[in-house]
Amino acid sequence: MTCHIPTWPVASDKIALGGKSWIRAVESLIKLTSAYPMAVLLGRAGMGKSQVALEVCKRTNCIYIDFTEMGERSMANIAAVVAWRLLSRHGGREAKSRIVEAYRKFGYEGLLSLARGDPTWTLKAALELADTRVVVVIDELLPSAEDPKFFEAAYILHRIRNMNLPNASFLVTMLPEVYEKIVERIPPLGNLFLHVTVQLPDVIPEEEVEDLVSSFCPEKAELAKKILQEKPDITVRELLLELNNLPSRRFVELTPV
């Protein structure tokens, strides 16, 4: 057996990405982020948004920010993390600026203090230290359209959009209901999103399930097809859980004779 199905299928940079639609999404996002200051990856929960975003990171000069790990959804936190990651890579070399001095003297807390005072300046100053264009992935910034801080978080994106940074692009993952609310309620942001959005499939295409599963476990590709026949709206995450936990014989009789 050459199975490498994660027992708890959450996104990881060590997991291979399969499925033509998912690979195409990566390629499209790389093109968008090389040309525009912002791009959006849209998809249902469990359909692989974070895994696609991590694959984009593998192929670009990237900073990945997972907001499930952040205590506060704020522009200051984004600016501080971007500054920290960039300066951790090369230490500012010989550059002389407030941001480099804060990093050398106080580390992350110094950068966060600067960012809380002026997040826009901190973010811009940090990105100016990068050698090449930077893709900043903002994952899980808006986990729900009903979140009480929805508009505060959406304003962060609006603010970044207006900065129009020439040496960076921000890739934002988003649920369909969040996307629809932004398009409806914040037209300037929504109008931009309409042109820079890549959407993952709502369901797993039957013709792609073998390719998708083979990246984890070629031996279970046929079983995956049978599961998809029984549950056509199953998500990628749910499918991997089933493949990991169910004996193959459960689906032996599903194929019509």
Image (cartoon, rainbow, N blue to C red):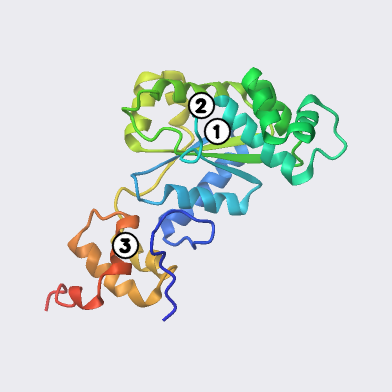
Residue name at image x 46 percent, y 53 percent: 11
Mark 1 crowd level (few <14, some 14–19, many ≥20, 10 Å Cα): many
- Residue at the limit of the structure toward the bottom, as seen here: 1
Residue name at image x 34 percent, y 26 percent: 181
Please provide percent x and percent y for residue 12: 50, 56
Q: Distance between the residues labelled 1 and 2?
A: 9 Å
Q: How far apart are marks 3 and 1 (CA)?
A: 33 Å
- Which amino acid type is marked by label 2? Leu
Counting residues from the start of the chain, the first of labels 3 and 2 encountered is 2
**Which numbered circle lies on residue 157?**
2
Residue name at image x 35 percent, y 63 percent: 208
Quadrant location of residue 243?
Answer: bottom left
Please provide percent x and percent y for residue 51: 47, 52
Please provide percent x and percent y for residue 49: 43, 47
- Which amino acid type is marked by label 1? Met
Residue at the disc numbered 3: 241
Cβ atoms under marks 1 and 2 closer than 8 Å: yes
Q: On screen, 200 above or below 179? A: below
